[in-house]
Amino acid sequence: MPGYVAILTILLISLAAGVCLYWGFRIEVKRVQARKYHLSTPDLPDFWQDKKILCWSDLHVGDGLPLDRLDYFLGLIRAEQPDLLLFVGDLSESADFFSPEERQAYLQSLAQLKDLAPLGLYAVRGNHDIESQAAQDFFDQAMAAMGAQALVNQSLTLHGLQLIGLDDALYGQPDMATACADSQPDFAVTCAAAQASVSCQLGTLSPTKACQKGPQSPGKTQESPEAPSCPVTQVPLRAQLVLLHEPDPAGAYLQAGGFPVPTLFISGHSHRGQIRPFGLQLYRPCQAKHYNYGLYEFPQALGKLIVTAGLGTVGIPARFAAPPEYIVIQL
């Protein structure tokens, strides 16, 4: 009898493992969620009332997202009929190995988003977008195919809403002072002050140091965790929407500046851990140690940070307890 019990146990464990693998590799990677945020913003220009902003990140087309799945995901985005589209980095995976035919097929698929949103499509670069020359070339070609404008330490005003796009924090150099250099003089000065005040935190959250820190417990994401101890400068920055691929530097900006108007940062990069057996956060990538997923509040800065799980995968082409998503922000 004990022998039969052992065999049955092994069979059940093997069956459970097989089901989990099938779920992670074949089912959950396609179960896209639309994460909706209804944000009340008192100082928002009247034009933006009831407007729909759709944001997504971490496509990783290629090894992390085959063409048929890309078409499916883009179909979901099109069905939302957003007013404004925002992409927060990491467009491709292994762009160095794309054949000319694959590259063209991906670009034709991405072109589905051209002219979709009446207020435009804006994007920032992620670490996988600038890790090689081939990745940079593909990113630039994709921006042209989608009719998108990439913001690399640049800002613009959309009907009274200030939109800032910062460079990638791992392989680039996010710089809010540069982003606002062409803005009104008083606004440019406050951006420069914000960049100066956050330099301590950005140094603390360098890629090397971030990788050396152990993972933190998942916890709830309703309030920001304790940030590194750095001087705080009250900065009258009037930016309202800031895109930055990595969430830890985004959190550092909010910790450093006292924003007199509601300011929202949107980041990706973390994939919410991508593989989370029993909901356990086993891995947090560099620059996503402190802020990993969801909505974080920064009352002292009148700010918020949203970290999205993204759509694609990196490394292992599977997701478990971390389904792909795009976010819809209703103002």
Image (cartoon, rainbow, N blue to C red):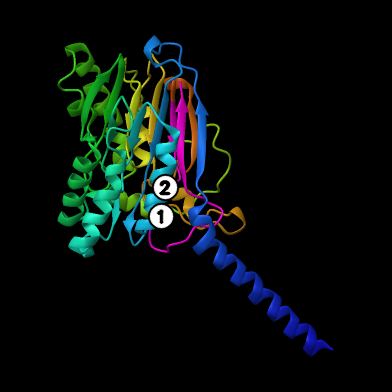
Q: Is residue 223 magenta?
A: no
Specify the quadrant that holds the C terminus: top left
Distance CA(mark 1)–CA(mark 2): 6 Å
Question: According to the image, label 2 marks what residue?
Answer: 73
In the image, residue 93 lies at what x, y percent? 30, 57
Question: Does residue 288 lie above or below 224 as drawn?
Answer: below
Question: According to the image, label 1 marks what residue?
Answer: 69
- How crowded pointer 2 is (Cα within 10 Å; few <14, some 14-19, many 20+) is rated as many
Whether tag 1 and tag 2 are in contact, CB under 8 A, the answer is: yes
In the image, residue 197 lies at what x, y percent? 29, 27
Question: Does residue 300 lie above or below 250 as drawn?
Answer: above
Q: Quadrant of residue 75?
A: top left
Q: Quadrant of residue 199?
A: top left
- How crowded pointer 1 is (Cα within 10 Å; few <14, some 14-19, many 20+) is rated as some
- Please give the name of the residue rendered at 40% of the width and 26% of the height, measured from the top-left corner: 264
In the image, residue 128 lies at what x, y percent? 27, 52
| Bounds of the magenta segment | 304-331
